Image (cartoon, rainbow, N blue to C red):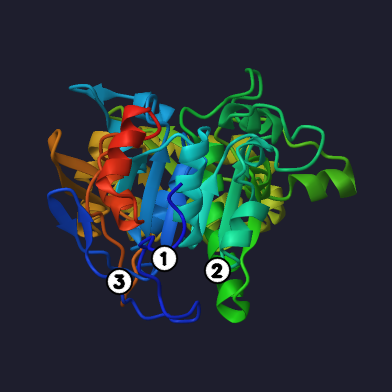
Amino acid sequence: MFAGEGCVRWERLPTYTTLRNTRADVPLGETTFRMSGPLSDLRVLDASTVIAGPMIGQIMADFGADVVKIEHPQTGDSMRGHGTHKDGHGLWWKIVARNKRCLGLNLNHPDGAEVFLNLAADADVVIENFRPGTLERWGLGPEVLSARNPGLIVCRVTGFGQTGPYAARPAFGTLIEAMSGFAHMTGESDRPPTLPPFGLADSFAGVSGVAAVLMALHHRHATGEGQTVDLSILEPLVAALGPHIIAWDQTGEVARRSGNRSLNNAPRNTYLTADGRWVAVSSSTDAVARRTIELVGRGDLAGEGWFATGAGRAAHTDEIDDAVAAWIGRRPLEEVVEAFAGADVALAPVYDVEQYVADPQVQAREAVVTVDDPDLGPLRMQNVLFGLSATPGEIRHPGRTLGADTDEVLAAAGVSAEQLADLRDRGVIT
């Protein structure tokens, strides 16, 4: 309907191997946001929902990619309804959709699918997390997209991956946290398995997905060839759990719950100060463990043969913990923090969010920034993931309303005002 001669495309770079940031300003309604950063030569279509896929798009947008968030025109991304709201606006959405342009487009409608094909023809990356076979049913599978755009990277995010007997099963991060072994090894030894109170599996998959997409783009830089990323939410989380598989394979040992203690080292726990504040102590190296036990007045333990290794100390956790807990329990937080810092020992207070935001290290690093939002005014949120000395990322704007940029995105892709009105009347776009 909209393809063919005379269709205006997104401005493309001369070749896939051009690395200069040559993008112009991107219009966003009445405001123009300058695209800058190491990924500012990339166009991304984020057709995913909830956390893992959108987080890939968020991180890429933070570092300059022009990310177009595609949502169902009537319902939007269900992430808009998650978490705390203020004045009808989802606050989590303001983060996960930040720096993205928002397009309401029904991919399950033939005309909507055709619009998507035209957009994907000039994109670098497509992110989706529908159940396997859904895009194919709509005529938008990777083979169709790649036929129009051989250099396209299609990142497919699902709970269990595109293959295997569970591929078609519905899966959310909670199921993955259970199945991966994370919940089995988290919590107190005599209590039920513990699930995290946030999207752990999804978030880890999101960060992993950025790495996968950039690897695929690196391959395209060398060859001009696109490819499909098959990202299971399950496998990245399992990779983060450490040596539990190889330990089971070689020794038959199954990781078990140990509360805040470590099965590999000691001291490692949370301890209560005299003024009622919790602190966390970690001593992952032998030298730090020795300095810790000397600081709390039990240097005699450092002379024991078993103290020389993490495994030996873990076998004597009760004795070590009693010493550390007693010393900390007799002192207020400020004194404990200063003493541990002076002894070059690893300790940190257990913060709530208000305490985190107020911390001088957080403020010095600008790890939390204030961003202006047209709906709610100034908002504080976590900054971009890391610093780059030459091409830093930035937050240009928080998540926008459903369909806020539909007209700008589609007009730039060659859709006329009359066609926009027709598509909107029929519910294909919003």
Which label was assigned to residue 42? 1
Give the Cα separation between the discs numbered 2 and 3: 18 Å
292 vs 188, nearest the viewer: 188
List x then y, in percent, for residue 9: 38, 63
List x then y, in percent, for residue 224: 59, 76
* Three-letter amino acid code at the position of disc 1: Leu
Give the Cα separation between the discs numbered 2 and 1: 10 Å
The picture quadrant where one finds residue 365 is bottom left
Which label was assigned to residue 154? none
Q: Is residue 205 visible?
A: yes
List x then y, in percent, for residue 243: 73, 50
- Residue at 38% over, 53% down: 67
Sequence-first disc among 2 and 3: 3
* Three-letter amino acid code at the position of disc 2: Leu
* Three-letter amino acid code at the position of disc 3: Arg
List x then y, in percent, for residue 17: 50, 81
Q: Is residue 53 shown left or right of residue 132? A: left
323 vs 86, nearest the viewer: 86
Q: Is residue 318 shown left or right of residue 369? A: right
Of marks 2 and 3, the one in the foreground: 3
Residue behind mark 2: 217
139 vs 78, nearest the viewer: 139
Q: Is residue 39 above or below residue 138?
A: below
- Residue lying at the far front of the rendered structure: 5
Regarding mark 1 in the picture, which secondary structure is present there? loop
Residue behind mark 3: 23
Give the Cα separation between the discs numbered 1 and 3: 9 Å
